[in-house]
Image (tube, rainbow, N blue to C red):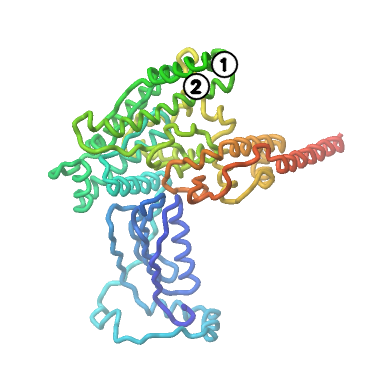
Amino acid sequence: MGLDGVEIFTNASGSHHVLRKAHARVDLVTMATTKNGGIYLLANQKGCDGDRLYYDGCAMIAMNGAVFAQGSQFSLDDVEVLTATLDLEDVRSYRAEMSSRNLAASRASPYPRVKVDFALSCHEDLLQPLSEPVEWRYHSVGEEISLGPACWLWDFLRRSQQAGFFLPLSGGLDSAATACLVHSMCCQVCEAVRNGNQEVLADVRTLVSEAGYTPEDPRELCGRLLTTCYMASENSSQETSDRARELAQQIGSHHIGLSIDPAVTAVMSIFSVVTGKRPLFAAHGGSSKENLALQNVQARLRMVIAYLFAQLSLWARGAPGGLLVLGSANVDESLLGYLTKYDCSSADINPIGGISKTDLRVFIEFCIERFQLPALQRILAAPATAELEPLADGQVSQTDEEDMGMTYAELSVYGRLRKIAKTGPYSMFCKLLHLWRDVCTPRQVADKVKRFFSKYSVNRHKMTTLTPAYHAESYSPDDNRFDLRPFLYHVGWPWQFRCIENQVLQLERRERQGLDGVD
């Protein structure tokens, strides 16, 4: 079209948000107009589609490889209008300088034209000042996470007509990140109201059932819309309880502290009465099967209690409505299946379910500065733990990375290779052999890949019950929309693991021969 003389291109897009996607959008638009010349108008949808996607706006006007107007990427405004004053002669002179383009244009097939009595400008426009190129302002990853999922939460809340959110707050990083997203949502709502957004104001008043209410303080609004709950057990430490309570105070949520021990005791008593058996934790002499079952009982009871309080806690406080339960399992844990089926990862929606642990740590660091939440410093420094096994001398004896047998940084690499690069065990081994050649031997790489795929295949069935999550990464394991692979695999991966083993043996043999040659 450009070769045939078209000078203005419009793109009415439906492009959903993924972390770091703005760079790709800007590059595509500026590269297209750099190569071809012309004015490019990009408009994009805004808001939640009632599903896992959030459309983030990010409109722009570009000409000849430069951006002249940038729209907001995240906003609670339904409509945003972007304008720029540009000179079409600049397009023509830009194109005239490209002799190769002009040669191709002379051979281009003409597009059909519809002639209309219409002009984009008039003689008086001669005095209009032209727009100047602008430097595109990119959000940092932490800032993107604070805005995108928060806008998605607001759209979901107002459209569901519920009265707020209920969040099991464990004192760990994932649930803290989810709480911070609700706080960020409240900040955006207050800012939109201050800027005169009457639709947001009307939605807030509907949610809180108060016709004259005007939100001014994000902490006060958070106290109305977010209920957090620390569900302690005999395996919980005082440290995590204190961290959860301190964060709740700083963001302003209505916080509840309770013990699930009576419920755990009651459920285990039923089992003991029926079977005559009393399972024990591994620390007390029990088998691994007993140990896992006792952990799962605690986790699943927390889900039951969460839904009970989500339905009735506002009623108990004399307020109308119910609450949406928020999940807080990150994308890496979901991919590996490091969660209990139907535990607190089972919720109504999960704003961090598409975000890696690595990016969540960046987000928490961002929140410490942006929202002045010093409680997050202790949470960031603490080791990730489920606290489902007995404490050792009052201290946590169980950590997530030790349980998984791999670090969160490694898990992010596995996720991208498995989902985006479509690698199986052997392909992943070959890629990691080069990627990690400075830090791991071939045998170590093989062991890590086998461990990942063994756990991945054993836990794949859990993907069928994942809570709908904000889509922020293209390696989301959500099988309902983004990952259509089977959820029943041969756990041993016999052919693939045998290929890896043969390759490792060859590499080790070659290394020994090289050492013998040196001797």
Quadrant including the C terminus: top right
Amino acid type indicated by mark 1 = Gly
Residue 187 locus on image (x, y percent): 27, 43
Secondary structure, mark 1, is loop
Query: Mark 2 = which residue?
Result: 294
Q: Position of 167 compared to 359: left or right?
A: left
Q: Position of residue 389 (x, y in %)?
A: 49, 20
In the rendered view, would you say 82 is above or below 511?
below
The answer to whether marks 1 and 2 mark residues whose Cβ atoms lie closer than 8 Å is yes
Question: What separation in Å lies between label 1 and label 2 (alpha carbons)?
Answer: 10 Å
Q: Which amino acid lies under the numbered mark 2 shown in the image of this protein?
A: Leu
Q: Residues within 10 Å of mark 1 (few under 14, many from 20)?
A: some
* Mark before the other along the chain sequence, 1 or 2: 1
Image vertical order of residue 178 relative to residue 243, above or below: below
Q: Which of the 4 quarters of the picture holds residue 374?
A: top left
Q: Is residue 395 visible?
A: yes
Query: Could you tell me which secondary element the residue under label 2 belongs to?
Result: helix
Q: Residue at x 48, y 29 (%)?
A: 384
Q: Above or below — where is 286 with respect to 469?
A: above
Reading the image, the residue beneath label 1 is 286
Q: Residues within 10 Å of mark 2 (few under 14, many from 20)?
A: some
Question: Which label belongs to residue 310?
Answer: none
